[in-house]
Amino acid sequence: KNTGLFSFSRQSYNLKDWMAFARVQQAAGNHKAGMPVDKIFDDFVLSKATDYLPAHLDEVDPEFAARFREFRDANLLFEVMEQNVWNKAMTDTVGLRKYFDAQKAKYTWGEHVLAIQVTAVDSLAAFEAFTILNDSPKSWATLNTQYDGRIFADSGRYELSFFPEGLRVALQQGKCTTPKKYQDDENFLFVCMLETGKAGIPKSFDEARGLVVSDYQLLLEEKWLEGLKKK
């Protein structure tokens, strides 16, 4: 049972090791009765090589070992940050609300409009929707069900900076901009402006939620890093 079978530079394996491996694999259902012996042995060698290489990577390829550690450390950091910061900020509704209530003054609208925004995958759908909304802006919600997913329409407050520059300059109250493709977007876009809004109007929690989550994440990250320094 102590008969040597193969070895790496700092580790050798014998018949006893192989037999132990075979028993574990059979018990786990990985090796069926009648499996060729050479296949079991190949699996044994691969398993031990897989275990050996990470532990002795510096000896095999020092440069790759350094990169491997950087990658592993980055992945570990990502997992820890995800657990302690990002996921917590997304799911801690009580904490988010408290943070928003304490920082309300910073969440206000810039120059904005109350408008209907429509995105269409082709020009035919875009101009049909354009005609409908020019006649009846209140019917915008029906567009989402009439065109089998070729159109997406939504209504709300939008800061002017949200729109492409070419669209911003075309906005006129009570009118819809002409459907166009902007920048590298493959879809057609147009906006029907209902009214303008002054800068400085407070945002509701729902309106500011994306910014609140981002700011709350930064706060949690700072507290988490401070906690690490104290340990």
Image (cartoon, rainbow, N blue to C red):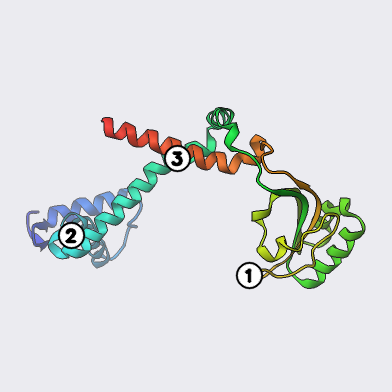
Snapshot quadrant of residue 190: bottom right
Q: Which residue is mark 2?
A: 57
Q: How many marks?
A: 3
Side of 56 where 173 appears, left or right: right
Quadrant location, the N terminus: bottom left
Q: Tell me the residue at 34%/37% (across/down).
A: 225
- Residue indicated by mark 1: 183
Residue 219 falls in image quadrant: top left
Would residue 44 be seen by someone viewing this image from the given angle? no
Q: Position of residue 8 (x, y in %)?
A: 11, 62
Q: Earlier in the sequence, mark 3 or mark 2?
A: 2
The residues bearing labels 1 and 2 have C-alpha atoms spaced at a distance of 48 Å
Classify residue 15 by image quadrant. bottom left
Residue at position x 39%, y 42% from top? 81
Going 66% across and 63% down the picture, which residue do you hit?
165
Name the residue beneath numbered marker 3.
218
Q: Are marks 1 and 2 in contact (CB under 8 Å)?
A: no
Q: Left or right of 160: which side holds 94?
A: left
Spot the residue most to the right.
Answer: 135
Residue 221, how many percent across, how many down?
40, 38
- Give the amino acid type for the residue marked by disc 1 in the picture: Gln
Residue located 17% across and 65% down the image:
61
